[in-house]
């Protein structure tokens, strides 16, 4: 019986498998991934020697649902059909699929945890939130956290807060990429060669995030440090405030949160 069965061998499933192996979470022979597409299955075998690549579910101690939301009912039914080989714990990273829906498709003995990761998990820098189901206890949450922590930061929230997580960190990478695009274009507009503007913009975003992650100063304090009275940064910030950039980010997160809630209801 496998210690962990990853159902879905897409990019997020691949990222989680890679992180777990790198962290020594389990030996390759204790892990398995279900991938029905032959070409993708062969690719996973090359990427993860020793990990079993299956075309259907097999008995396991625990499982991760890393398939598209529309495929969740089929995956849950397959796990339930294992009988005594059904997992004791299931972690779902399928966006918009509620705990009630997951628990309704699995045996009552299964502890379910729902998660919202984001795409930086693909490079080990993800931000994820987990929410416990009705029968999930502290040990189940710790287990789910140990999986997602292999590819980034993990926080625990209530399920009702997952929509806000989606609006902030789930959709957030797209907001940051848009800022990066704008900074690069601005550099080109002001006379820099595009490769130079791109290198500087990426390094600026990475360095700024690293300063924030150091945790010694708040975002407001760090911004104030860069802003000399009457200086260049003050001039630039004045334009951003005039164009209501701060309000636009607030509205963007709120809109994404509302859309996540709408999708969950449907």
Image (cartoon, grey):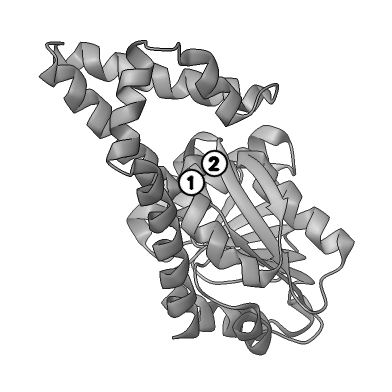
Residue 31 or 231: which is nearer the viewer?
231
Q: How many numbered markers are drawn? A: 2
Residue 49 or 116: which is nearer the viewer?
116
* Residue sitting at x 77%, y 78%: 110
Q: Position of residue 120 (x, y in %)?
A: 48, 40
| Outermost residue, front side | 230
Q: As displayed, is residue 61 above or below residue 170? A: below
* Residue sitting at x 75%, y 47%: 146
Neighbor class of circle 2 (other Cα within 10 Å; few <14, some 14-19, many 20+) is some
Can residue 49 be seen at all in this image of the molecule?
A: no
Mark 2 secondary-structure assignment: loop
Q: Position of residue 25 (x, y in %)?
A: 74, 42
Can residue 79 be seen at all in this image of the molecule?
A: yes
Q: Quadrant of the N terminus?
A: bottom right
2 and 1 marks in contact (CB < 8 Å): yes
Q: Is residue 254 left or right of residue 87?
A: left
Residue 139 or 52: which is nearer the viewer?
139
Q: Quadrant of the C terminus?
A: bottom left
Task: Tell me where residue 213 sits by quadrant.
Answer: top right
* Residue sitting at x 55%, y 53%: 117
Label placed on residue 228: none
Q: As displayed, is residue 257 above or below residue 223? A: below
| Residue placed under numbered mark 2 in the picture | 48
* Residue sitting at x 59%, y 71%: 57
Neighbor class of circle 1 (other Cα within 10 Å; few <14, some 14-19, many 20+) is some
| Residue placed under numbered mark 1 in the picture | 45
Q: Position of residue 89 (x, y in %)?
A: 76, 69
Q: As displayed, is residue 117 above or below residue 265? A: above
Mark 1 secondary-structure assignment: helix
Q: As displayed, is residue 110 above or below residue 89? A: below
Q: Gap between marks 2 and 1, in whole Å?
A: 5 Å
Q: Position of residue 261 (x, y in %)?
A: 49, 75
């Amino acid at each position: 019986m496998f210690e962990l069965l990853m159902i879905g061998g897409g990019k997020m499933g691949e990222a989680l498998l890679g992180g777990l192996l790198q962290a020594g979470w389990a030996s390759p022979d204790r892990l398995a991934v279900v991938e029905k597409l032959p070409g993708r299955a062969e690719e996973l075998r090359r990427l993860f020697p020793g990990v079993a690549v299956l075309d259907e579910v097999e008995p396991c101690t625990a499982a991760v649902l890393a398939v598209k939301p529309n495929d969740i009912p089929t995956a849950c039914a397959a796990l339930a059909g294992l009988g005594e080989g059904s997992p004791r714990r299931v972690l779902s990273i399928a966006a918009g699929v509620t705990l009630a829906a997951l628990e309704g498709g699995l045996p009552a003995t299964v502890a379910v945890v729902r998660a919202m990761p984001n795409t930086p998990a693909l490079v080990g820098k993800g931000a994820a939130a987990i929410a416990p189901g009705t029968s999930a206890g502290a040990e189940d949450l710790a287990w789910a956290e140990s999986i997602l922590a292999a590819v980034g930061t993990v926080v625990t929230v209530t399920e009702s807060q997952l929509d806000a997580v989606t609006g902030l960190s789930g959709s957030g990478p797209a907001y940051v990429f848009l800022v990066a695009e704008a900074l690069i274009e601005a550099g080109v507009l002001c006379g820099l060669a595009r490769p130079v503007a791109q290198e500087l913009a990426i390094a600026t975003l990475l360095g700024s995030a690293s300063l924030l992650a150091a945790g010694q100063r708040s975002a407001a304090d760090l911004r104030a440090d860069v802003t000399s009275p009457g200086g260049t940064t003050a001039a630039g910030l004045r334009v951003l405030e005039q164009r209501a950039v701060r309000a636009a980010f607030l509205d963007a997160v709120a809109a994404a949160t509302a859309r996540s809630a709408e999708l969950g209801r449907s």
